[in-house]
Image: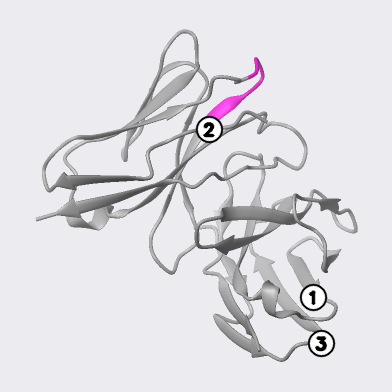
Amino acid sequence: LAKTTQPISMDSYEGQEVNITCSHNNIATNDYITWYQQFPSQGPRFIIQGYKTKVTNEVASLFIPADRKSSTLSLPRVSLSDTAVYYCLVGDHGNQGGKLIFGQGTELSVKP
Amino acid sequence: DVKVTQSSRYLVKRTGEKVFLECVQDMDHENMFWYRQDPGLGLRLIYFSYDVKMKEKGDIPEGYSVSREKKERFSLILESASTNQTSMYLCASGLQGYEQYFGPGTRLTVT
């Protein structure tokens, strides 16, 4: 399973776009990239998943360059309620059992 | 909406006690997982199960066991609780590995 590296913390202001980059130099051919969000005192929540190029849903966008050694989670126009920890995960999630390896995550703080 | 429930939000147990943490999901998911979360260490996988009566060790299975007698229920057992098992325990379920649905967590304190 590929190890991921992401910033420990980030600060932003309401209304700004936030980009959180995750590096995963040892990503394997079968690996997918998945992002989770966790609010205090709650379990993590799935945000988005991708394999290559760009994926967008109602919450976020995920940009993956051609070499797939990094990925960027983009949150458009954040609000105070986006303050949370964001985890980048890489793995062959399609495998039976689907082991997810959570790293330290990025603690995003959105200020008014 | 998928719902994953855990038997307790907060639990206090004494050292040496046998502790049962229950998790129930209502979406007929094959895969279920138990994690623990500690400050500075993130989430770590204890055990997972991809079918009834099947179980696989995660990264930190020592001191724990699991039981899955029914598809919707996955139990984590601490055979003899110790203070270093004080933690937040999170259960999750899912069809495919990458999209897991987490319960609210059980904050266990072992004194």
Please state which of residues B70 and B14 is positioned toward the viewer in this rendering: B14
Both on one chain, marks 1 and 3? yes
Q: Which residue is mark 2?
A: A4
- Percent position (x, y) of residue A56? 35, 28
Q: Residue B77's image quarter? A: bottom right
| Residue identifier under label 1 | B78
Residue B46 located within the stretch drawn in magenta: no
- Residue corresponding to mark 3: B16
Between the C-alphas of marks 1 and 2, the distance is 30 Å
Point out the frontmost of discs 1 and 3.
3
What residue sits 74% from the left and 32% below the top? Answer: A95
Check disc 1 and give the amino acid type: Leu
Q: Position of residue B59 (x, y in %)?
A: 75, 50
Q: In 3D space, how far apart are the residues under numbered discs 1 and 3 (Cα atoms)?
A: 9 Å
- Residue nearer the viewer, A35 or A20: A20
| Residue A5 % position (x, y) | 48, 33
| Mark 2: secondary structure | loop
The residue sitting at the right extreme is B53
Q: Residue at x 19, y 56 (%)?
A: A80
- Mark 3 secondary-structure assignment: loop
At label 3, the amino acid type is: Gly
Depicted B102 relative to depicted B11: above or below:
above
Badge 1: how crowded within 10 Å, few (<14), some, or many (20+)?
some
- Quadrant for the C terminus of chain B in the image: bottom right
Q: Which residues are magenta?
A: A28-33
